[in-house]
Image (cartoon, grey):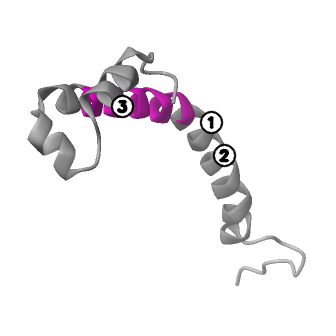
Amino acid sequence: MSHIPDDATPAHRSLPLNWSLNQMLADLAGKPVAFVAKWMERSRDRMYLLDLDDRMLADIGITRREVEKLTDIAFWRL
């Protein structure tokens, strides 16, 4: 009959520590991806705004001048 010592640590007790480390590494690796995704989203949204006519822009409360100012900003800013 096998005897497991009382002070033995079951494998599942180390999972939270491993999970935390894995999660931290995934978060660090994911941050650049998140930045690029956000930049792409901003760039796409600004292109959509450029395609709207003045009536559509008025419907959402934006002027053509505001769109032009917004699209002049680099995609990695605001």
Q: Residue at x 39, y 32 (%)?
A: 37
Q: Disc 1 and disc 3: Cα gap in Å?
A: 22 Å
Q: Residue furthest right?
A: 7
Amino acid found under the numbered disc labelled 1 = Leu
Q: Is residue 43 left or right of residue 12?
A: left
Q: Residue at x 36, y 31 (%)?
A: 42
Please state the horizontal and vertical placement of residue 5, each as a whole percent of the image. 86, 77
In the rendered view of the protein, which quadrant contains the N terminus? bottom right
Q: Main secondary structure of the magenta part?
A: helix
Residue 56 vertical position relative to residue 42 in the rendered view, above or below? below
Please state the horizontal and vertical placement of residue 18, each as a whole percent of the image. 68, 54
Residue 22 vertical position relative to residue 64 in the rendered view, above or below? below
Q: Disc 3 and disc 2: Cα gap in Å?
A: 27 Å
Q: Residue at x 33, y 34 (%)?
A: 41
Q: Is residue 37 left or right of residue 14?
A: left
* Total marks in image: 3
- Location of mark 3 (residue): 42
Q: Secondary structure at mark 2?
A: helix
- Location of mark 1 (residue): 28
In front here: 38 or 2? 38
Q: Residue at x 43, y 26 (%)?
A: 36
Q: Residues within 10 Å of mark 1 (few under 14, many from 20)?
A: few
Q: Secondary structure at mark 1?
A: helix
Amino acid found under the numbered disc labelled 3 = Arg
- Location of mark 2 (residue): 24
Q: Secondary structure at mark 3?
A: helix
- Of circles 3 and 2, the one toward us is 3
Q: Earlier in the sequence, mark 3 or mark 2?
A: 2
Please state the horizontal and vertical placement of residue 38, each as a whole percent of the image. 42, 34
The span picked out in magenta is: 31-46
